[in-house]
Image: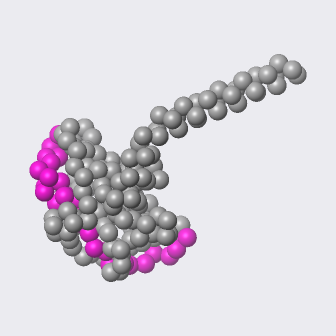
Amino acid sequence: MHKKSFAVICIFLCLFVAVWISLKLNQPNIEEQKKLLENSEILLLANQQEYLIGLNDLMEIGEEEFTSVLDTSSTNPTNHKYTGVQLKNILSHYQIDLDESSALVLSGMDNYSVAYTTEEILKNNNVYIVFKEDGNYLGSKENGGRGPYESIVVADDFSNRRCKWLTRIECVK
């Protein structure tokens, strides 16, 4: 019986140390995401280049209005009018060629990430980075909002592939 207790304590200590090390290794990433969120910026990583994108940059690229369904686990599906920029237009603006990428990974402040294929992104009127819903800015995490930015795939019937509190977009091969 005493050996089992010792083994359980050792396992617990190993798990604790592993979690602590993981948190320490991720600390710079968490701080970077907080700063991006506070500054209302998105970090775009592509072809060994980094671009910081803010609201004015998005508006300069060309904002569009579109309608999409919002369907969460706690709400019924409802149509909303969104304002944002097609992701393919953002990439084009920064002269990012998707020929060498298989997907883009978008990440939010809550460490949720979603991958979109290049085919999805290049489809017209499909993948957007939005900053307004029904004419109102998305709002911050602190005030119950989903912004300042959120990704939306219009072709998705359910809202499970959205990335709220978006802080990072990365091209992957």
Q: Nearer the viewer, residue 75 or 65?
A: 65
Counting from the top left corner in percent of width and height, residue 105 is at: 33, 47
- Eyeballing the image, is 133 above or below 122? below
Residue 100, percent from left and from top: 17, 40
The residue at 79%/22% (across/down) is 6
> Residue 24 location in percent, x, y?
51, 35
Q: Residue at x 43, y 66 (%)?
A: 140
Q: Where the C terminus falls, by quadrant?
A: top left
Residue sitting at the far right:
1
Residue 155 within the magenta-colored segment of the rendering: no
Q: Quadrant location of residue 91?
A: bottom left
* 75 lies left or right of 88: right
Res 155 seen here? no
Q: Is any atom of residue 53 visible in this view?
A: yes
Give the total number of marks visible in the rendering.
Answer: 0
Residue 43 lies left or right of residue 30; in this view the side is left
Instruction: Please give the name of the residue rendered at 38% of the width and 57% of the height, measured from the top-left corner.
Output: 37
At a point 13% along the width and 55% down the height, the residue shown is 92
Whether residue 74 sits left or right of residue 125 in the image: it is right
Residue extending furthest toward the bottom: 135
> Magenta part of the protein: which range?
74-100
Q: Quadrant of residue 146?
A: bottom left
Quadrant housing residue 166: bottom left
Instruction: State the quadrant of the N terminus.
Output: top right
Say above or below: 93 vs 133: above
Left or right, 130 with respect to 88, comes to: right
